[in-house]
Amino acid sequence: MTAFLIIGGVGVALVLLALIIGDVLDGLFHLDVLGGDLFSFSSLAAFVGAFGFGGALGLALIDSTLVAVIVGVVIGAIAAWGPCH
């Protein structure tokens, strides 16, 4: 569970960084190659944070790493899709 919580913490730090200098990072890393916000820095940061905390939640509910990863990916995808719409 510790790994998922660390990933979630890194995601929160990235979200805070995206709030402060997100447009600069998008231009620096050219993450908007598809013309949308799906691969923007803020969307990727939201995915990382939600994946970590969603995985920790899945691991707490059902003691299976595979289930935790699946829950983390689903919650992360929903979080990454959120800023786009």
Image (cartoon, grey):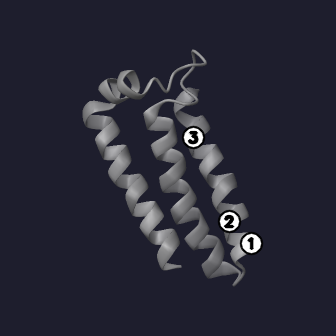
Q: Secondary structure at mark 3?
A: helix
Three-letter code, disc 1:
Leu
Identify the residue under disc 2. 69
Crowdedness of circle 3 by 10 Å Cα count: few (<14), some, many (20+)? many
Q: Looking at the image, do the residues carrying marks 3 and 1 touch, with CB atoms under 8 Å apart?
A: no
- Whether 78 is drawn above or below 73: the answer is above
Q: Cα distance, mark 3 to mark 1?
A: 21 Å
Which one is in front, 57 or 43?
A: 43
Q: Looking at the image, do the residues carrying marks 2 and 1 touch, with CB atoms under 8 Å apart?
A: yes
Three-letter code, disc 2:
Val
Find residue 80 and name its label: 3
Q: Residue at x 55, y 19 (%)?
A: 33
**In the rendering, at what x and y percent does residue 63 appear?**
69, 84
For residue 64, side relative to residue 25 (left or right): right
Q: Residue at x 74, y 71 (%)?
A: 67
Which one is in front, 14 or 53?
A: 14
Q: Residue at x 66, y 79 (%)?
A: 61
